[in-house]
Amino acid sequence: MYNEKIAQRVILPETSILEALKLMDKIGVKALLVLQETRFFGILSIGDIQRAIIANKSLDIPVGSILRTNPRVGYIGMSDAQIRELMVEYRMEFLPIINDEQEVVNCVFWEDIFHKSANIPLKLFKLPIVIMAGGMGTRLKPLTNVIPKPLIPIGEKTMLEEIFERFALYGSNQFYISVNYKADLIEYYLNNLNLPYDINYFREEKPLGTAGSLHLLKGYINSTFFVTNCDILIEQDYSEILEYHKENNNEITVVAALRHFHLPYGTIETGTNGKLLSLMEKPELTFKINSGMYILEPHLISEVPTNTHFHITDLIEVVKRRNGNIGVFPISQQSWKDIGEWNEYIDNILPDY
């Protein structure tokens, strides 16, 4: 009944959240069409899934239980101008067109109208961005014997340029780069590009871990700020992460990627005296993985010890011990691209460029 572009997005209300999320990753979309036979049931967005995960709902529950009420749809007879206006206002990947019997007769896709991606920021923000770029990139040797990891090529650009451009899309152009290994080469390369950003370098005299160099920013950053590793790319509206951070009064927000793992063996759970409690054949496990992107409040800079090896996990433990708010914002597996290891770089980065 539907063309392939529509049909591949169709799921049933009883589809589990996990299966829907895996389908989004497989076909590279952030919204699916939920139908009960041919009747419109709802639109499942990545935001719906993220809110469910934040609310600690099981990934095994049906998507029908987490859908928003009164989703926006189009109707037969709407003009092209009305459709465009609706899709622009709500940044819709697609707009289902339904008839009087609530049947979906067509879908209008963003790229078919605007001939470009629907990745438009929800809101702009002008915040400092800290990029941790001081590591030696040992897992990418021997390439990093010559080129520092922040300058690893991504298409015709480097990782650092790719990160700059993504944040600049939101109006943020003030960058603080923590450097150590091959710092002179990084500064020389960037300084010769004449980029339209305010780039500041702060140099570790010795390796200080994933957060230790933040003490060098005392007196320089006085607002909420992003921190990102130099070897990851996040395919997510950053303004939505910031909104979550603010709404929950977090001191730290950790961006976590969902990763799915298949065990090739049956697992057994036992109780007292070895009594069998359960047996599961070749289960699939899903974990939240620290992606390497965070949002921090500026007072935390003062809680980083001076000139001491100190990881971001150490800072998180400091905040936990005093019952500070730490939030976790989930993103899908395919929304996290990592170049920290050769196989990840080859599999997740090179094919896209």
Image: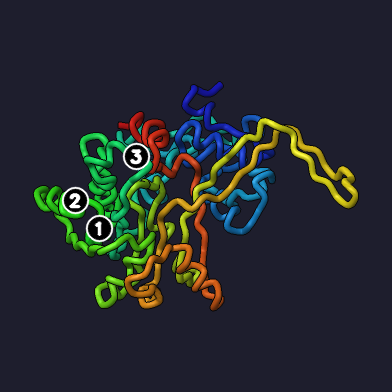
Q: Which mark is residue 179?
A: 1
Q: Quadrant of residue 41?
A: top right
Which three-letter amino acid code belongs to the residue tagged 3? Leu
Dot 1 alpha-carbon crowd within 10 angstroms: few under 14, some 14 to 19, many 20 or more: many
- As measured in the structure, the alpha-carbon distance from the residue carrying label 1 to the one carrying label 2 is 8 Å
Of residue 224 and residue 292, the one placed in the foreground of this image is 292
Q: Earlier in the sequence, mark 3 or mark 2?
A: 3
Which three-letter amino acid code belongs to the residue tagged 1? Val
Q: Position of residue 171 (x, y in %)?
A: 26, 58
Q: Position of residue 5 (x, y in %)?
A: 47, 26
Dot 2 alpha-carbon crowd within 10 angstroms: few under 14, some 14 to 19, many 20 or more: many
Q: Is residue 192 above or below residue 9?
A: below
Q: Which mark is residue 186?
A: 2
Q: Are marks 1 and 2 in contact (CB under 8 Å)?
A: yes
Q: Quadrant of residue 235?
A: top left
Report the side of 244 relative to 69 (left or right). Answer: left
Identify the residue shown where x is 29% and y is 55%: 134
Location of the N terminus by quadrant is top right
For label 3, the residue is: 140
Q: Position of residue 155 (x, y in %)?
A: 25, 34
Location of the C terminus by quadrant is top left
